Amino acid sequence: MSPDSLTRASARSAAEVNEQIRALWMRAGGTRSSQERAEYELLVVEWAAAIRTDVIEAA
């Protein structure tokens, strides 16, 4: 996942991103390649942004 795809995907909900994180962990089977670690890091950043958006909208 590139930073460009992160920008395009930023409209996804926290639940959608969380599901993708879970799928990544299942695919990795406990050990992650450097590419999977990088993808995971981007997903966590996207998830955190989605959570912040959810909190702001709820307020």
Image (cartoon, rainbow, N blue to C red):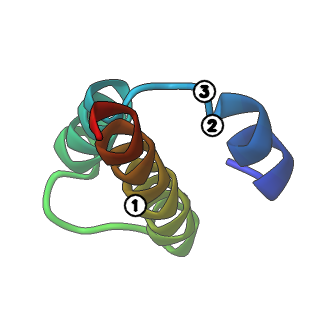
Within 10 Å of disc 1 (Cα), the crowding (few <14, some 14-19, many 20+) is some
On residue 11, the disc is 3
Amino acid under label 2?
Answer: Ser
Res 35 quadrant in image: bottom right
Q: Which residue is located at x 45 percent, y 43 percent?
A: 53
Please tell me how many numbered marks the rendered image carries. Answer: 3
Q: Nearer the viewer, residue 18 or 14?
A: 14
Within 10 Å of disc 2 (Cα), the crowding (few <14, some 14-19, many 20+) is some
Q: Are marks 3 and 2 in contact (CB under 8 Å)?
A: yes
Res 19 quadrant in image: top left
Amino acid under label 3?
Answer: Ala
Label 1 sits on a secondary structure element that is helix
In the rendered image, residue 48, in percent from the top left (x then y), is placed at: 39, 58
In the rendered image, residue 15, in percent from the top left (x then y), is placed at: 26, 28
Label 3 sits on a secondary structure element that is loop
Q: Is residue 23 left or right of residue 8?
A: left
Amino acid under label 1?
Answer: Val
Looking at the picture, does residue 15 appear above or below residue 32?
above
Q: Which residue is mark 2?
A: 10
Query: Mark 1 against mark 3, which lies toward the viewer?
Result: 3
Q: Is residue 44 left or right of residue 35?
A: left
Q: CA distance from mark 2 to mark 1?
A: 12 Å
- Tell me the quarter of the image containing the C terminus: top left
As drawn, the residue found furthest toward the front would be: 59
In the rendered image, residue 20, in percent from the top left (x then y), is placed at: 35, 33
Q: Which residue is located at x 45 percent, y 70 percent?
A: 37
Q: Which residue is located at x 78 percent, y 56 percent?
A: 3
Q: Nearer the viewer, residue 1 or 6?
A: 6
Q: Nearer the viewer, residue 55 or 5?
A: 55
Q: CA distance from mark 3 to mark 2?
A: 4 Å
On residue 44, the disc is 1
